[in-house]
Each structure stands twice: as structure tokens, then as C-alpha cells.
Image: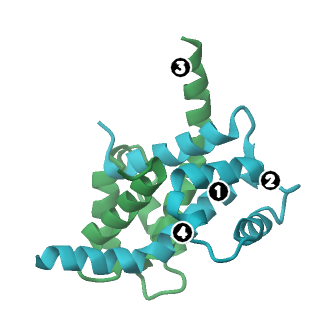
Chain colours: A cyan, B green
């Protein structure tokens, strides 16, 4: 049985390739669908309608408007890091109950 | 119910804080125990006995011998990226069966 971290790594690989299909990169449309399915609250709660364009621009600076697996991992690392403070507060509150 | 990616992100946060305890960083000993528990094959199969020292040195360049959550995420991104080619081949073989 895989460990928590092995499972998390497998999920990241599985998700990328599920939305990329046979390619080894995500197009802007692939990433939009991935974000909609995997982070349903993220796009809905974005006040900036151009948020996805900005993310794509940041991620695909070194490629022809596409996102590599490496850059996808950096996006996930960035999202996880930005959620971490909230997670710590939430876990501490849970621990106190 | 969280999506695959939300679950993966939660597992990374949970694992880091499980091994860091009340601190917001991992010591070398914390990271060694984390690697042993979460990636049991990794240290066993290392031919280089100084592998862990090298990882720590790379990760903690900007800090006092400790690993922040941000740097932990970069380690996981690096490990996941290095496993990805193997994963793709494995999934294709599985698909053919």
C-alpha cells in the first residue's frame, strides 16, 4: 500500500496525464478544464476574469503557450503553499475541539 | 468530497506538519524520519550514504540547516518529476493489457 506522499505524487501525475491526454503538456483549454474539475471553487471565486490568462502567461513563459509537467508541479506547489497558513489554523482549531 | 488534487495538496500539508510538529520547518532528523516513513525504498536503495546530507544541503541553502514548507514542496516536485517518465511507461503498459 503506498504511503500518503506516494499517493499524493501518484495523484499529481495521474491528474496531469488525464487532462493532457497523449501529449506531454497542457494547453490553456486543458488547464482551464483541469482547474474547473479539480479546484471547483478557484475559478468561481476569482474576482479577476483574466486570472486564468495570467496563470497561463506565468506558467508558459518558456514554452509556446503550453504548460509542461514541471511547470504544472510548480503551480500546485504555489497553490499548496498559499493554502498552508489556512490549513495550520484549521488543524489547530480542530485539535482544540 | 475533495477532488484528487485537493486530496493530494492536503496530504502534502498534513505530512509536513506531522513530522515538523509545532515548528514551521523540518530539521535534518525530521526529514530523515519523514523520508524513511513516506519513501521507504528511497533511502534503502541509495548507493550514496551521503545522499540525505546532499538533499539537506541543497534544500536548506537559505536557512540555518532547516527545510521550510516551500522547500519541502520543491523536493516533492523534484521527486515527482523524476518519477513521471516511469509512471507514463507503466500506465501505457497497463493500458495495453
As helix, strand or loop, the secondary structure at mark 2 comes to loop
| Label 1 environment density (alpha carbons within 10 Å; few <14, some 14–19, many ≥20) | many
Work out whether A82 lies above or below A33: below
The structure residue drawn at horizontal position 73% and vertical position 41%, both measured from the top left corner, is: A24
The residue at which mark 4 appears reads as A79
Q: CA distance from mark 4 to mark 3?
A: 31 Å
Q: Are marks 3 and 2 in contact (CB under 8 Å)?
A: no
Q: Foreground mark, 3 or 2?
A: 2
Give x and y (percent) for residue A21: 69, 34
Q: Which residue is mark 1?
A: A72
- Name the residue that disc number 2 marks: A66
Mark 4 surroundings: few (<14), some (14-19) or many (≥20) residues within 10 A: few
Point out the tag, 2 or 1, that comes first from the N-terminus: 2
Front-most of residues B67 and B5: B5
Q: Are marks 4 and 1 in contact (CB under 8 Å)?
A: no
Q: Is residue A11 left or right of residue A67?
A: left
Residue B89: x %, y % from top left: 61, 28
Task: Identify whether B64 is placed above or below A1.
Answer: below
Location of the C terminus of chain B (image quadrant): top right
Q: Residue at x 46, y 59 (%)?
A: B51
Marks 2 and 4 close (CB-CB < 8 Å): no
Q: Residues within 10 Å of mark 3 (few under 14, many from 20)?
A: few
Name the disc covering residue B94, or none: 3
Q: CA distance from mark 3 to mark 1?
A: 24 Å
**Quadrant in which residue A20 is drawn:** top right
Amino acid at each position: 500500500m503506498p504511503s500518503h506522499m506516494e499517493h499524493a505524487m501518484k495523484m499529481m501525475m495521474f491528474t496531469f496525464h488525464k487532462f493532457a491526454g497523449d501529449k506531454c503538456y497542457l494547453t490553456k483549454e486543458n488547464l482551464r478544464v483541469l482547474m474547473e474539475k479539480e479546484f471547483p471553487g478557484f475559478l468561481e471565486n476569482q474576482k479577476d476574469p483574466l486570472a486564468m490568462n495570467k496563470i497561463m502567461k506565468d506558467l508558459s513563459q518558456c514554452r509556446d503557450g503550453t504548460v509542461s509537467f514541471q511547470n504544472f508541479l510548480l503551480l500546485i506547489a504555489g497553490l499548496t503553499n498559499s493554502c498552508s497558513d489556512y490549513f495550520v489554523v484549521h488543524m489547530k482549531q480542530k485539535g482544540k475541539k
